[in-house]
Image: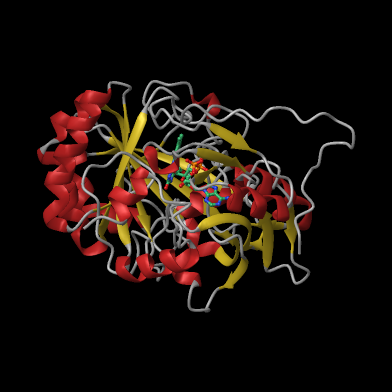
Amino acid sequence: MTPSARRPRPGTPAKPVHAPRGNWSGTVEYGFRDASRPTTTDEVRRVVTAHDHLRVVGTGHTFNAVTDGDHALLMDRFTDVEPTPDGTSVWVGGGATYADVALALRPHGLALRNLASLPHISVAGAVATATHGSGLTAGNLATHVRSLELVTGTGELLTLHRGEPDHAGAVVSLGSLGVVTRLELDVEQDRPWRQVVLEGLPEPEISSRLEALHSLARSVSIFLRWDGEPARVWLKRREGDPSPPPSADLLQAAEEHHPIAGLDPVHCTPQLDEPGWWADRVPHFLMGFMPSNGDESQSEYHVAREHGPAAVEALRGIGAEIAAAAQTTEIRAVAADDLWLSPQHGQGTWSFHFTWSSRPAAAERAAAAIEEALAPLGARPHWGKVFHHAPRPERLDDFRVLRERLDPDERFVNDWVRRVLLTD
Ligand SMILES: Cc1cc2nc3c(=O)[nH]c(=O)nc-3n(C[C@H](O)[C@H](O)[C@H](O)COP(=O)(O)OP(=O)(O)OC[C@H]3O[C@@H](n4cnc5c(N)ncnc54)[C@H](O)[C@@H]3O)c2cc1C
């Protein structure tokens, strides 16, 4: 089925398409020479075959050069959202954001199983980098993808369904296989969610309480600053899910908080236990509001479940260095999957996220120190954030073979992809 994207009225002169100059926070400068904004799948195919080197730009919320390239293909005309008749999945356009999807699902009484900290990001861009929320049993957002419609580097249109041989290889693609024109995502019945923040978690107790704290709700985040101050625990519960009582030493916050201490929580989803729409509780930031700080970059490292306590202690060992560069740290859980380039491939993880201040040199130094501290524990970086050492995923060789088959002329290979994925 061809997406019925919004088309300009006949007779309207075509506006020039401007290539984006950089990422969302302005910390990465793009080198695009020009751009196109197709409105149909056939146009996407023509744009692909007309350019030797191109990259799709989603909503630009990555913090490294994964998205950069020569020609920018903008997919923001592909925002259709169509639930399937049986109500178990939804087709979404390759430029739709999670906010687009949530708003379109609402009248159908449907919801997604999980979200990242913000609904502002494009679904295809989030899936391409294995973006995640939190939950001991919640896979990253790429695991929601039942089917993927892709225009490959040869201009061919493929649809890959879960269970078919190439699906697990193609979902987390880092944009290097072609243009995702549509995705089919699993959905569940919409139910109200509630959110509360618990205060007073002593930093030295985090390592021994990771598992117990993350068992308190379907989605849990621990926020801390490595400055000796107690951490906060954010609990997000779906109505009707089991709700074990938290330990008596943690007090429910009487007022709302921003994940970055001291910032106004007006941008954040409600936290005082009021039931509400899932898309206003599962992310930390409200759609339509500025997420996080804006003046920042980010890094994140995923460590296998069994190494969680050791990872927390290793990070405490360099806590002063992290505290000097980070605005906040978040600890989340992500469940294992079978997607070839997913950091959760074959292992559930504890995921340690760092929002850096806008001083790049301090952030680079702290990220390097974290990589050194977590290397013995086999940490894997978030593909969309700042990192130094390229990981070597177990299925990388298989991915390279798939990549060459779908994009033999390397139209979707940029410098970053060559360095990180294609160089030994
Ligand atoms: C404030 C903030 C909060 C964040 N919170 C989280 C979080 O909670 N959890 C987390 O894991 N990450 C988080 N991130 C990181 C972010 O979700 C990821 O980096 C994600 O990949 C961003 O998607 P995008 O479309 O905005 O990025 P882009 O840079 O536009 O795209 C990312 C990649 O996807 C490719 N791509 C995009 N669309 C398509 C398409 N249609 N076809 C083929 N390839 C495509 C691009 O080429 C690029 O390689 C956060 C980022 C910010 C700025």
| Residue 187 against residue 255 in the figure, above or below | below
Q: Residue at x 45, y 39 (%)?
A: 69
Whole-percent x, y for residue 248 in the image: 33, 47
| Residue 220 against residue 169 in the figure, above or below | above
Res. 103 image quadrant:
top right
Q: Residue at x 59, y 61 (%)?
A: 150
| Residue 7 against residue 187 in the figure, above or below | above
Whole-percent x, y for residue 123 in the image: 57, 50
Whole-percent x, y for residue 86 in the image: 75, 72
Res. 344 image quadrant:
bottom left
Q: Toward the viewer: 77 or 237?
A: 77
Location of the C terminus (image quadrant): bottom left
Q: Toward the viewer: 101 or 53?
A: 53
Location of the N terminus (image quadrant): bottom right
Whole-percent x, y for residue 346 in the image: 32, 70
Q: Toward the viewer: 258 or 378?
A: 378
